[in-house]
Image (cartoon, helix red, strand yellow):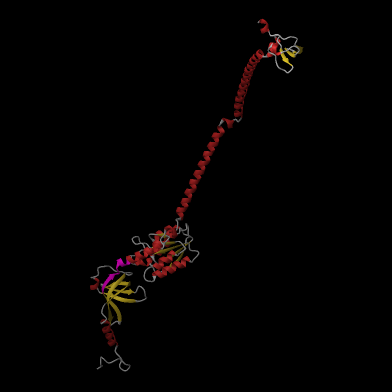
Amino acid sequence: MTDPTAPATAEAPWPVARLSHELKGYIDRLGTVWVEGEITQWGVSGGNVYGKLKDLGMDATVSFTVWSSTRAKLTSDFAQGDRVIALVKPNFWVKGGTLTMQVYELRHVGLGDLLERLEKLRRKLADEGLFAADRKVRLPFLPQCIGLVTGKDSDAEKDVLRNAQLRWPEVRFRVVHAAVQGDRAAGEVSAAIRTLDADAEVDVIIVARGGGDFQNLLVFSDEQLVRTAAACVTPLVSAIGHEADRPLLDEVADLRASTPTDAAKRVVPDVAEELARVQQARARIAMRVTGLITHEIDRIGQLRSRPVLADPRTLVDSRAEELTRWVARGAELMDYRIERAQLRTAELVGQLRALSPKRTLERGYAIAQRADGAILRAADQAAPGDHLVLTLADGRVSTTVDEAANEGASRD
């Protein structure tokens, strides 16, 4: 009989069954432990759940089992992609030689903690100005080539391609596939954005995913991914497809689309609609030009119908008649003024002649002046022998005073 405590040697090796039982006994002594990770597989069979739990930061995965009795006690629904904490106990299956974790309790990672961390990051990036409206770039009106970052063979990819090509069949796409959930997603999406941003032919970039729950969308709030999107020179559209939750990528993107279909419609104009708008614009322009020309034709017709343009001599003739009347009136007024002036002049001449000394001289009077030109007004102003000049009505004569007598003195 083999000693159960004897060590295994080449001469006395252990049977596989003993090794399996030794492993099971050692593992059973480990007890339970709380672990945190992401559910990457969740399958239900016979009421039991068989899945896999992956570390969020490292490439490490363990299998787990949730027996139906434990599953019935769970208060929440779980699915692939959920971030959870689980109370597990290692369990070694001897018959199959596999190690699995038996789950005794399973909980979602505290939503409050996630929201708090997300809000802190949101405030931090907002303070840096990454969400500012003046940083956002207007999308090109008609992009020739669109870069698309999405999951391979996803509904989001099909929706964007189909709706864009329906609106403009000539549009070209440069598609870069990347994981859109899980621990690899942030790095792959960031790398895809950098690749498309470096492509000179890409006019706009769309990051698309067909929705998901809050935890599945956390990857699009990854700080490194958000900073990569903010540094992107090419206009970027976020089309995560979730109305209730707004990942930080929505805030930093140049345009947020509610769904991948909405992104295609907002990035690519509908050629039929644009052609219809062009036709409408041309019709409005033609109508406006026609109305303007018709108005000008009517206005020119009205101008031509005016008498002055119908017979230009009318203006000259009417003005000539008016000018003749004014000339005649002017001549009449001038004759009247001259006649009045002549009468007034005659009156003044008569008055002047009546007051003129010559009229007095013509009546026989004379003006006596001494040699020094002084006029004599009295006899005593002259002495006998003085030479006088007498001014007559017609000419002058010289005389000598023989005698001077004052008439007033003789009467006395």
* Residue 177 in view here: no
From the viewer's side, name the closer residue of 167 and 177: 177
From the viewer's side, name the closer residue of 162 and 141: 141
Give the position of the C terminus as an image quadrant. top right
The reply, left or right, for residue 2 in relation to residue 381 is: left
Give residue 359's quadrant in the image: top right
Which percent across, then down, holds residue 165?
Answer: 44, 60
Looking at the image, how many numbered discs can be counted on the residues? 0
The residue at the point 32 percent across, 77 percent down is 62
The residue at the point 29 percent across, 78 percent down is 100
Give residue 321's quadrant in the image: top right
Residue 300, above or below 270: above
Give residue 385's quadrant in the image: top right
Residue 329, above or below 31: above
- Residue 112 on the magenta segment: yes
The reply, left or right, for residue 181 in relation to residue 310 is: left
Magenta highlight range: 104-114
Which percent across, then down, holds residue 1?
Answer: 24, 94
* Residue 299 in view here: yes
From the viewer's side, name the closer residue of 90 and 110: 110
Which percent across, then down, holds residue 181?
Answer: 37, 68
Which percent across, then down, holds residue 128?
Answer: 41, 63
Residue 59, above or below 113: below
Residue 258, above or below 31: above
- Residue 373 on the magenta segment: no
